[in-house]
Amino acid sequence: MSDKVKRLLVIDDEPIVGKRLQQVFSKIGFEVETYTEPVAAMAAMAAHPFDIVVTDLKMEGMDGLEVLRQAKAMNPAARVIIITGYASPDTAELAQQQGVFAFLAKPFRLDELKQVIFRALEELEAGQ
C-alpha cells in the first residue's frame, strides 16, 4: 500500500457488518468510516472523499445503486463495491453500466471482500 492512507466507506443497514469490516480493515491500515444511513454517508463523502466504498444494495432511504451514482459523481476515481443478499442479473447489469467495481452476494467470505478491495487499491495506485 502506498504512503497515503486509503479511506474506506462502509454503508450497511446492519451495524454488525460495518463493525466487522472496520475491525478488519483498520488493522491493515485503512481509515474506515461506517454508516447505517446512506444519506449520512453521502454527506460524509461530500465533505471528504473516500477511495473505496462498500455499500449494501437494499437500504432505507437510498439504495446501493444511488450510492454508486452519487459516489462516482463526487469522486470519479472511487471504487464502489456493492454487497447484497438480493443479487439479480438485472441489478448486477445496471450496476455494471454505472461503473460498479464489484458486486458480491451475501453471505460473502471476508477474504473474498479483502481480495476485491486489494484489487481496487492496485487499480487506484496504478492511476487507472
Image (cartoon, rainbow, N blue to C red):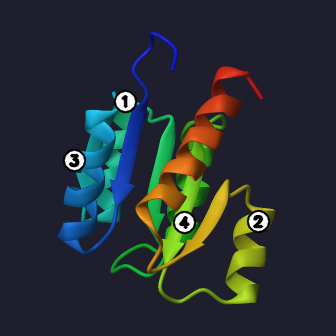
Q: Residues within 10 Å of mark 1 (few under 14, many from 20)?
A: few
> How far separated are the C-alphas under marks 3 and 1?
21 Å
Q: Secondary structure at mark 2?
A: helix
Helix, strand or loop for disc 1: loop
- Mark closer to the observer (1, 4): 4
Rendered residue at 52%/14% (across/down): 2
Q: Is residue 123 left or right of residue 115?
A: right
> In this rendering, is residue 21 above or below 33?
below
Q: Examine the rendering and report whether any part of residue 103 can be seen.
A: yes
- Label 3 or label 1, whichever comes before in sequence order: 3
For mark 3, what is the residue?
Answer: 23
Which labelled disc corresponds to residue 48?
Answer: 1
The residue tagged 4 is: 82
Q: Regarding mark 3 in the picture, which secondary structure is present there?
A: helix
The kind of residue tagged 1 is: His
Going by the numbered disc 2, the residue's amino acid type is: Gln
Q: Earlier in the sequence, mark 4 or mark 3?
A: 3
**Spatial separation of the CA atoms under disc 2 and disc 3:** 29 Å
Dots 1, 2 in contact, CB < 8 A? no
Label 1 to label 4: alpha-carbon separation = 20 Å
Q: In the image shown, does 52 or 40 lie closer to the viewer?
A: 52
- Mark 1 or 2: in front is 2
Q: From the image, tell me which residue sits under label 2.
A: 96
Asked if the residues shown at circle 2 and circle 4 are in contact, with their CB atoms under 8 angstroms apart, the answer is: no
